[in-house]
Amino acid sequence: MNIRIATTQDCPLIQSLAKTIWPVAYRTILSKEQLDYMLDKFYTPAALELQMEQGQVFFILEENGEPLGFAAVALHEKPNIAKLHKLYVLSHLQGKGWGKILLEHCCVYALQHHQQSIFLNVNRFNKALTFYEKFGFTCIETVDIPIGNGYLMEDYVMEKRL
């Protein structure tokens, strides 16, 4: 198992992983139209490169050279608080500990950069909510974030002290 920092060269790989993971992860939560809209908005190589330029550090989780998932963290999103922007593992590998490994890596990364806590947004109807609760995240806010085209991200903001 290997976790490495992604470069802009990895943007097509991240896009491919998202296009594989998202339809399964969000099939009961989002319409196909909203799913396609969000993938086009957040996961084109150009959009991913911009996120990297704006401070998101992407990690690729691999085993034997095969990509299994990815995550993205931004430091100092708030004073001494990191934000976990993304954490995705291929659906057929969920429940096998890969998400935990990737999450722990992101938390260690944040700690190494003197962050006191880490927060994230998770869709209020996403089964991943219990995953984050299991690892010590607590809900601190409920938000509805307009993302264009009349769509909202209906999220809980969750935080964990490091």
Image: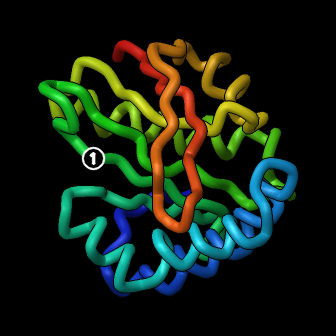
| Vertical comparison of 80 with 110: above or below | above
Q: Residue 122 placed where, x, y %?
A: 58, 36
Task: Give the residue displayed 13% in from the left and 26% down from the top.
Answer: 79
Task: Give the residue displayed 49% in from the left and 30% down from the top.
Answer: 143
Q: Amino acid at mark 1?
A: Ala
Q: Residue 53 placed where, x, y %?
A: 19, 69
Query: In which quadrant of the rendered image does the N terminus lie?
Result: bottom right
Q: Is residue 95 left or right of residue 104?
A: right
Most extreme residue toward the front is: 150
Query: In which quadrant of the rendered image does the C terminus lie?
Result: top left
Q: Is residue 110 left or right of residue 60?
A: left
Q: Is residue 73 left or right of residue 63?
A: left
Task: Give the residue displayed 75% in from the left and 35% down from the top.
Answer: 125
Q: Secondary structure at mark 1?
A: strand
* Residue 31, quarter of the rendered image: bottom right
| Vertical comparison of 71 with 48: above or below | above
Task: Give the residue displayed 79% in from the left and 48% down from the top.
Answer: 29
| Vertical comparison of 106 with 67: above or below | above
Residue holding disc 1: 74
Q: Residue 83 placed where, x, y %?
A: 34, 38
Asked if residue 66 can be seen in this view, the reply is no
Crowd rating for badge 1 (residues with CA inside 10 Å; few <14, some 14–19, many 20+): many
| Vertical comparison of 48 with 90: above or below | below
Q: Residue 104 placed where, x, y %?
A: 49, 33
